[in-house]
Image (spheres, grey):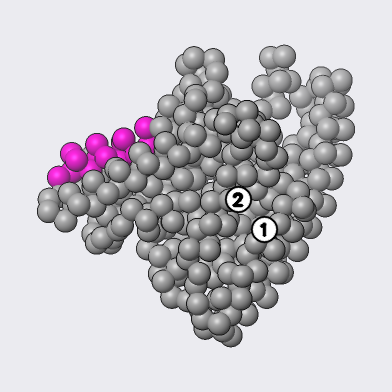
Amino acid sequence: MVNWISSLPNFSAYGTPVYFIYLILALLPLGIGLYFGKRFSWYEALVSFVFIFLMFDGSSWQQGISLIVYVIYETLLVMFYSRYRRQQNSAGVFYLLAGLSILPLVIVKLSPAMVGHNSLLGFLGISYLTFRAVGTIIETRDGMIKEISPWKFIRFILFMPTITSGPIDRYRRFEKDYRQVPARGDYLNLVSKGIFYLFLGFLYKFVIGYFFGQRFYPFFEQLAMTNHSLFSWSMLGVMYTYGFYLFFDFAGYSLFAVAISYFMGVQTPMNFKQPFKSKNIKEFWNRWHISLSFWFRDYIFMRFVFMATKKRWFKNRNALSSTAYMLNMVLMGFWHGITWYYILYGFLHGFALVANDWWMRFKRKHLPNLPHNKLTTGIAIFVTFNFVMFTFLIFSGFLDTFFFS
């Protein structure tokens, strides 16, 4: 059985144009049903199962086993807490269940640093599934989710278009979309948008992202390693080409997920909104990897601020917000991985958010007449863009190779 599964072809999500041909053909009956106002849930479940199976078969079959075990584990936690929450509301039980929910991800992230190899619990997409599961537990605690069935939770957490790379949806928003089959005109509008996003994703990932990631970046990387000068044109080349590659590759994946979701009648939220047009770092995080940054904002930043205010941990409101920014972004850095460059990346963005907050207060108090025009806007965008690109250079891990290899 294992040998048979290992011999099957593996279709990584959105990896090749061939994947899209099979996927769109498989989704045609579902689209026809939605056109006539019917959602074929059983057929959607079958298609999702087949394509998720194909993502984790072949050489990735062990990840597939980990995924099955993980989903059963998270479903049991969510069902237990949902039943418990209808009767009681102990903070201790909530923190215990939230901690148990995030525990597999913590083990996966710590394993390379602690034991020198990846955990057997790991599989592609575990981070995004964990955020959905923990978010569901949190919203159950808040009383926003009154009742949830195992099937509805599994359908949400394993929503096929977003399973490996997000965006990170919320249970209530997803379930509302899923229950309300769009009217014919609305569905045709979704399909039209989906086609546009699909082809834009092709342009981003397979054309622009390819050239930055496979052509330009390796050229500057080799040049920078040969010159071995930290302050050089080749290092700038590494910085900018990696930054653009990261955006176009990831944004391409996100556009694919949104497009396929639209074809399935679900309006998965957008993940990027022209982030390089941001005038400050706070605006950047409202435009970049939006579902992740909003998840951290709602479930880490805001809750820390609420708890610290309630318990009066800080006398100064500015000190509170600064601490919350740093905590939020450093945790995000740790989420990416337990390496110095991911943690430094999070620290720098936290520091930048604190500095931006300070600058806004200083400007309101001491520079009320500072002009706001195209020139100052252009300078703000330029500074923000280059700061972000510098942090992407750190995030890339290239400097780790540059300094220590």
Q: Mark 1 — residue?
A: 23
Q: Is residue 97 left or right of residue 1?
A: left
Nearest the eye: 180 or 244: 180
What element does badge 2 sit on?
helix
How many residues crowd mark 2 within 10 Å: few (<14), some (14–19), many (20+)? many
Q: Is residue 154 left or right of residue 95?
A: right
Residue drawn at 48 percent across, 21 percent down = 111
x and y percentages locating residue 322 in the rendered image: 40, 42
Q: Residue lying farthest left?
A: 87
Q: Is residue 80 left or right of residue 336?
A: left
Would you place residue 369 above or below residue 399 in this image? below
Query: What range of the chain is rendered magenta?
Result: 90-103
Q: Mark 2 — residue?
A: 51
Q: Looking at the image, can residue 381 be seen?
A: no
Nearest the eye: 221 or 41: 41
x and y percentages locating residue 227 in the rendered image: 86, 21
x and y percentages locating residue 82 in the rendered image: 24, 52
